[in-house]
Image: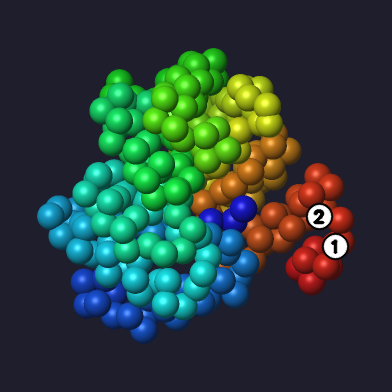
Amino acid sequence: MVISERLNGLFRSVGKAIDDRDVKFIQEHVLRQVEWGAQALDVNVGPGRGSDGPDDMRWLVKAIQEVTDLPLCIDTPGNKTMLAGLEACENPRIINSTTADMEKMAALFPMARDFDADIICLTMDERGVPNDADSRAEMAMLMMTTAMEFEVMPERILLDPLVWPVSAAQDQGHKVIEALRLFQMLNDPAPRTVVGLSNVSNGARDRGLLNRTYLAMLMGAGLSAAILDPEDRELMETVKSGQVLLDQKLYCDDYLRA
Ligand code: THG
């Protein structure tokens, strides 16, 4: 599943459109993501909005769903902003995200249950991101069992091993791949997995090359979904050829078109 990263207040043009309540800009932006092949949209109002977060998120979700029925992946660390987004959202919902922090899980899993939402579980807690694959898998297991206690079924969960910039932590690249493989052994059927792909190339040169190379490696390890830039043509070509090579698409129309 291709989740577009572009509806994010982190991008200056989107941040400004949120400030200006520019519905037209947002809706054209959404339709472009859809045209490029997005199958879900990550919706993030961006950092530093403080108490305006919930209002901004409510407005943004409403503007987006006027022009698409795609699932919206509500991306915020703020519980109030999350709740506002989920309440406004009538499309299929994905919560992005909870951590393994008990307080966070106790707030977010009930929201997943009550709003009938999928939920992304980041394998980190109040102490940070574990350094190796085994500890990430251990944390993933804890989150899946805790989710069950809140009546959130394993099918609802997307496990995120957390991708690091290769420029900052070169040893994490293969550990994330190993973690993905371990996650898939935690349940039958295998839990779904997701990453924020562009993290890997933060602060690096030729970001596109790193993004699409890493995506191919992650797809080979069984990745189910990625938050990425669908307007990157070569990256989307990598998605489509990967789907053919992994026998995920019987007919090759998308590949041939790409
Ligand atoms: N996991 C989950 N959710 C996530 C992430 C993750 N959401 C946020 C992020 N990571 C994924 N989204 C982005 C969006 C933009 C960029 C990276 C990841 C990005 N932006 C450019 C930059 O920072 O250089 C440009 C920003 C700008 O124009 O100012 O790289 O890991 N579950």
In the image, 51 versus 218, the foreground residue is 51
Vertical arrangement, residue 186 with respect to residue 229, above or below: above
Which residue sits furthest left? 51
Q: Position of residue 21 (x, y in %)?
A: 24, 77
Q: Residue at 22% x, 77% y: name it.
A: 20
- Check the image and tell me how it is coloured: rainbow
Dots 1, 2 in contact, CB < 8 A:
yes
Image side of residue 47 versus residue 111, left or right: left
Question: Is residue 203 in view from this perspective?
Answer: no
Vertical arrangement, residue 210 with respect to residue 136, above or below: below
Q: Which mark is residue 252?
A: 1
Q: How far apart are marks 1 and 2 (CA)?
A: 7 Å
Three-letter residue code for mark 2: Lys
Which residue sits furthest bottom? 24
Image side of residue 39 versus residue 114, left or right: right
Question: Is residue 179 in view from this perspective?
Answer: yes
Which SS class for mark 2? Answer: loop
Image side of residue 116 versus residue 12, left or right: right
Q: Residue 52 carries which label?
A: none
Badge 2: residue crowd in 10 Å (few <14, some 14–19, many ≥20)? some
Vertical arrangement, residue 32 with respect to residue 113, above or below: below
Q: Where is residue 153 in the image (x, y as percent from the top left)?
A: 52, 34
* Residue at numbered disc 2: 249
Q: Where is residue 27 in the image (x, y as percent from the top left)?
A: 42, 78
